[in-house]
Amino acid sequence: MQSTKISYHILAIVIVIIWGTTFVSTKMLILAGLTPAVIFTIRFIVAYLLILTISHKKMWCDTLKDEIAMAGLGITGGSLYFLAENMALEYTTATNTSLIVCSCPLFASLLCSWLAGQYLNKIQWLGTGVAFFGMVAVVLNGRFVLNLNPYGDLLAFIACICWAFYSLLTQKVGHKYSSKFITRKVFAYGVLTIIPYFFFRPEEIPTDLGIFLDATVWGNLAFLSVIASFTCYLLWTVCIHRLGTIEATNYVYINPIATIVAASLVLDEVITIWFALGSALILLGLWLSNKK
């Protein structure tokens, strides 16, 4: 039983590492001419069509209350989360955005304590704090300059809170519905709730379809749709159910490690000693936070 739980911890780490590399893929697609909203919409549409092949017998929840909860998952884990995060990058620095969004595990722990009665002991709070400061060191990567922008930082904070609520809601409905059903609902409501955005920003809809013939474009879209969305969202729902909101979400602290490593390999970004120190603190914090 213990070895089975360890396998879910490993799975959660792998998922977060994959999600960490998505920032690089998204950056390459933006450089190719696609907007973040278009990228999100395509990846969720493709992911929905894929999961529909393995989850199509049951289309609706048992109650209206549960259906509303599923819509909340699509918003907090899909449309609003991605819009807030990507719009934040337009007004504040990538460092500020990463710092605020990746502090999600801290807020998830607070939400679980306040709303779900899942209390951490002193060692687990210490571990969460150590991992948080390790994440700060990794994101700053030796550049101790923060340019505060209230509007952009607020958007990043909204994205952070969205993911915390998404994790909490996933655990709540996970006891009543299968992971495939929940994930399909996330993709469906994510797409439905992003559509109104394009009524206000129709210029973002691509008119030159030839862009999708480029190998870099369709390759990165395939990675984001099939791996980062379809596969990872499905497995993350399983991890939340098996490990709980706090334990699973704490692994989000690893996200910037994967991002910086991928950026150094693909975009030639520089890694400093602070990255190694921060990574060590994150691992120590995660070890402490998972102690009972």
Image (cartoon, rainbow, N blue to C red):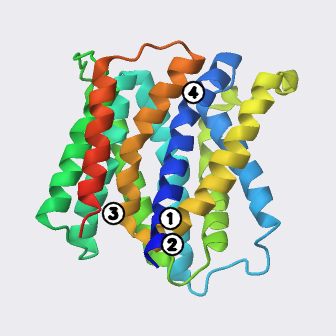
Q: Single out the mark in the foreground, 4 or 1.
A: 1
Residue 197 on image: x %, y % = 59, 41
Q: Indicate the secondary structure of the residue bearing disc 2.
A: helix
The reply to whether dot 4 and dot 1 touch (C-beta < 8 Å) is no
Q: Amino acid at mark 4?
A: Val
Q: Indicate the secondary structure of the residue bearing disc 1.
A: helix
Q: What's the distance in space between the residues labelled 3 and 1, CA to CA?
A: 14 Å
- Disc assigned to residue 24: 4
**Residue with the mark numbered 2:** 4
**Residue with the mark numbered 1:** 8
Of callouts 4 and 1, the N-terminal one: 1
The reply to whether dot 1 and dot 2 touch (C-beta < 8 Å) is yes
Q: Amino acid at mark 2?
A: Thr
Front residue of 263/1: it is: 1
Q: Indicate the secondary structure of the residue bearing disc 3.
A: helix
Of callouts 3 and 2, the N-terminal one: 2
